[in-house]
Amino acid sequence: MAAVEVENLTRSYTAARSASLFTKARGEARQAVKGISFDIGEGELFGLLGPNGAGKSTTIKILATLLLPTSGRARVLGHDVATEPTAVRRRIGYVAGGDRGLYERLSARDNLRYFAELHGITGPRQRRRIAELLELVDLTDRSDDKVEGFSRGMRQRLHIARGMLNEPRVLFLDEPTIGLDPQAARDLRATAAALSAQGTTVLLTTHYMHEADELCARIGVIVEGRLVALDTPAALKKGVSDRTVITVEVRDLTDRHEAEVRALGEVLSLAVTRGPATQVLEVQCADTGDAMPGLLGVLGSAAVSRVDTREPSLEDAYVALVSRSRAARAEADR
Amino acid sequence: MRTMRSLAGGLRLTLVGGFLSYRALITFLTPALFFVMMIATPLFQIITFSLLGRYSKAETADFYVVGTAIQASAMAGIYGASQAVANERAFGTLAQMLISPAARFWIMLGRLIPTCVNGIVVAVFGVFAGWALLGLRLGAGDLAPIGLAAVCASASCAGLGLVIGALGLRFSDMYFITNAVHLVLLIATGAVIPLALLPEWVRALSRLLPMSHSIAMAQDVVAGRSFSALHSVGAELLLAACYFGVALAALARSERQSRRHSTLELV
């Protein structure tokens, strides 16, 4: 039996303006998840990638019983998330990124105590579990300090400890490494991998491709509510193995340059990262020799400072999938 | 056996979880704010309305002192209990509460009991202040029924506070309701204006409001009038149970609506 089963799941939102006593919440209806299906095996570490607003968090919230699907079906360990929420809640942990979601006036230990009480974990088992988790997330020294004085990274580590309190069989990690320093993020990845090795099913969303590449047995890519790819990281990378990535660092990139690069026939996809002093273009193309002259011609006036070529990574595969999906959508809309 | 374990677990969640959530969610627990809201404001309220009442001569001075002392616990019940629920949304912790398997009955009871105890403390302090500063005459035999009135008034008031808190999960204007309700409880419960002087519809309303039955009982006690403790306590506790039930239903409805329409902006 799969630990998580998702069948033709859809979810529509009415983007709500906050309700008041005198007004109803209303807004534009929007379909956030559009008929996605996938399974996650027991003990599997599964990644869900996608741009902001693609539907990843909505999918996790449905699986964690916080939202109902509009149509379709989702089961966690055989329990329907819509009709058996309590059975699902007993078996899952849910960690969302961000500063909020903790009781600021309570200490780290008391936060964990309260959530342990909510899960019915009491007595010596509670004390032992809290001590283990505080040790695991390296907060033992600060365990009796109020959370209001915690840095973002410390809060995130406490979120993670809370999500693992009830020793969940399925753990949802929604961008868990946001705000963590590199060492803490590495520790978290090690923890997630260890949990998976011990049989915990982990569903991870992240924007960090190296994280997904390192951890996930399989990855689903969601774009605009649709699952556009579902495979192992190696297979996803293979999908762009016929490509080469040209990295060009420039100092004076304009929108016109960007549009002209996109318009080049040899360019299959483009990602731009803008830094304070320089801009980096990651250009995917089928053949470096064909693309390079046109590319350098267009960027000649953008003060090129560095040009490299390399083999495609998971990030390149992801960028290609997202670009391809958006282009197909735009074509269909036209 | 399983039922007993479940009951013990629920009671533990109510007491231990309730105490932790009270510390976590109530915003007036800093020493300065607690002093202003739970000591100074009730004290000045008791002094002001007792002196005004004394000059009105509509009732005895003790009538106003004991009435306003019991009514002073409304601040703890209305503001405390409403914050104990609605601040889950404000602090971004609501999602974690909602995805816990814990029975909502025990969670809500845990939100009620600490605010109820807070209310009792304020009312007892008010009665003591009335005795020490305003010459409230109390016999030894009066203490038990007045204490009972304080307990019942605090319980029903906290019940109404939970209802407001459950509505506050859904609506952003909770303090509009708490402020309005606090004023209504001041005027329409018989603490500062004898109910006999109020219009019939306000008297009818007062029977459905928290505190009015307890205040009437305490006022009868200090006046040496006969009273039915069973009737007053029964009516007040029935109101407390009704408000608690409405709060649970409102929470359940908010939770259903939230899952359907994502209305609680969970995380």
Image: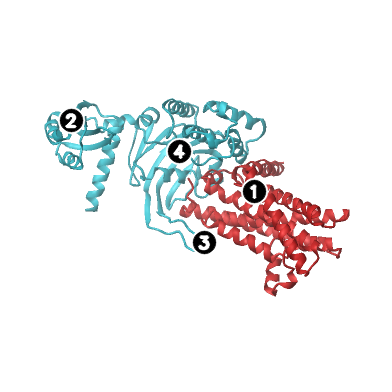
Q: Indicate left or right for A241 with A176 as reference.
A: left
Question: Do circles 4 and 2 both sit on a common chain?
Answer: yes
Q: Which residue sits at x=49%, y=59%?
A: A20
Query: Which chain is home to disc 2?
Result: A
Between marks 3 and 4, how big is the CA–CA gap?
31 Å
Badge 1: how crowded within 10 Å, few (<14), some, or many (20+)? Answer: many
Residue A228 image offset from top left, x and y in percent: 31, 42
Say which mark, if any, is on residue A304.
Answer: 2
Say which mark, if any, is on residue B111.
Answer: 1
Location of residue A143 with respect to B89 vertically, above or below: above
Q: Amino acid at mark 2?
A: Val
Q: Which residue is mark 4?
A: A97
Query: Which chain is home to disc 1?
Result: B
Say which mark, if any, is on residue A21.
Answer: 3
State which chain is coloured red: B
Which quadrant holds residue A285? top left
* Precedes in sequence: disc 2 or disc 3: 3
Badge 3: how crowded within 10 Å, few (<14), some, or many (20+)? Answer: some
Between marks 2 and 1, how big is the CA–CA gap?
63 Å
Q: Amino acid at mark 3?
A: Leu
Badge 2: how crowded within 10 Å, few (<14), some, or many (20+)? Answer: some
Which quadrant holds residue A319? top left
Q: Indicate left or right for B226 with B76 as reference.
A: right
Chain A drawn colour: cyan
Badge 4: how crowded within 10 Å, few (<14), some, or many (20+)? Answer: many
Residue B123 in sight:
yes
In the image, which is nearer the foreground, mark 2 or mark 3?
A: 2
Question: Do circles 1 and 4 both sit on a common chain?
Answer: no
In the image, which is nearer the foreground, mark 2 or mark 1?
A: 2
